[in-house]
Amino acid sequence: MKLASVAIAAVFHTAVCAVVKLDSDGTPELEFEDLTVVGQTGAKIHTTFGDGVRGDFKIPLYLKDGLDPESKRQRRAERSRKMKSFTEQPLSNNTAILTNVKDYYYYGYIGVGNPPQKFSVVFDTGSSNVWVPGEACVSDACNEHRQFKNAGSTTFQPSPQKIQIQYGTGFIAGDVGTDTVQVSKSLVLRNQSFAMTSQEDKTFELPRSQFDGLFGLGFTGGAEGNIRSPVDSMVQENVLKSPLFGIKLRRDSLSGNGEITFGSYDTSYTNNLEWIGVYGDIFWATTMEGILYGDEPQNYLYGADKVSAASGVLAVEEKARASRKALLDTGSSLIYGDPFSLAAMSTRIGANPLTGEIPCPVLASLKSFHFVLGGKRFTMQPEEYIFHDPATGICEVQWMPVSDYLWIMGIPFLQTYYTVYDIKDHRIGLARMRQ
């Protein structure tokens, strides 16, 4: 089952909470605590929710492990074959082809160093660092993947800096260095800092993680270690025709992969793009105003009603909930949000709020959910927010609770919409994907 662990996450969602504190100046501060992730240290990203409410949240990247043993064996063999035949998968001038692994994640390839050493990476809009396994790393995850060899690059520059990153699921630590990073044939970053891991946890082991590392597509404000992010490097080094990139993720059920295009985008979507503003300078996040079902007036986004409170005076918790943010995240396998909204959504369509399962025969009678992001409505149809496993005959919702305030619009949403990320003007364009 795709969401085999959803019941556990739902039962223990109280472990994912927001702790309200007051700074020395009396300003409310919210810290998200996720006791279910590996490790208690690592990167925390500071963000502002509005109206003086501030908070920290761990870098996203939520990967699910739902492959059965036979699928795992096949995927391991497939990865081995693809890695050996990497040279047979050339990149175009500005577009990288992304391989879809059962709708859990997508990965492409980059080259690091001179001559370039090839690595498979998740192009992740929910983080801002680049990392690959280091040669000195002895973790099983590193030994199962390609490892960067410093001496093999004539342009490598070492650094005394160390780095640790705690993701939503997964932890890495390593050393920072600078080298040439090749994203496509015509897109080369000459002085990009990146991490060579010395430690990776089980999240990044085979067969769960067929990719070697990560390529963060967020802004420098979201990078751990004050490292300039790749997208900001692209703009500073003037290697893009236009300061933007487009991402297309196709569903596995349609035998589709994905692609990321740097410096331009698929112009056949131009007339259909709806542009929304990016909130802050950390990741590709925007405001979230509501969740609607069909033509019903009820707003299922918990706390959204507090926005128009007659008194205009909100408690700290209400203020944060009324200032909800949503992150468009290519590195997360599902849609993640607060347990209150998700439970109400599941109940409305007849899904079990704990397990996420729903009787498959009812799909034909379900209506669409509408997510209001940046003040605009984006629709997901039942077949887009429900996962149907034909092998087991089980149907499940494609969402899971994480925290009270930050929503993560992961792969199911991004398979529904073609997205364009405007680096210079801090905005995102969305257009419904054509199948």
Image (tube, helix red, strand yellow):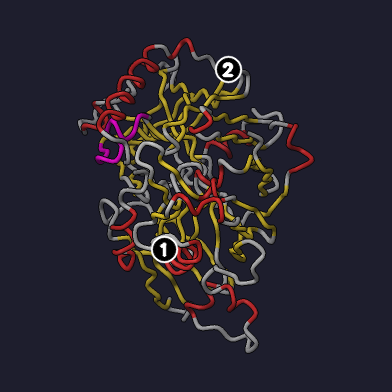
Farthest residue to the bottom: give it.
311
Residue range corresponding to the magenta coloring: 199-210
Q: In terms of secondary structure, where does tag 1 sit? A: loop
Q: Which residue is mark 1?
A: 403
Q: Residue at x 63, y 89 (%)?
A: 311
Q: Measuring from the top left, give residue 241's x and y in whole percent.
A: 71, 28
Helix, strand or loop at mark 2: loop
Between discs 2 and 1, the one toward the N terminus: 2
Quadrant of residue 91 within the rendered picture: top right
Residue to which mark 2 is pinned: 185
Camera-side residue of 334 and 171: 334
In the picture, measured across the screen, residue 32 lies left or right of residue 385, that is left
Identify which residue is drawn at 25% across, 41% down.
201
Using the numbered discs, state the Cα–Cα distance from disc 2 to disc 1 in whole angstroms.
40 Å
Residue at point 62%, 29% (across, down)? 261
Q: Is residue 272 left or right of residue 146?
A: right
Residue 155 horizontal/vertical position (percent):
44, 20
Instruction: Inspect the image, locate mark 2, and give the three-letter code of the amino acid beneath it.
Output: Lys
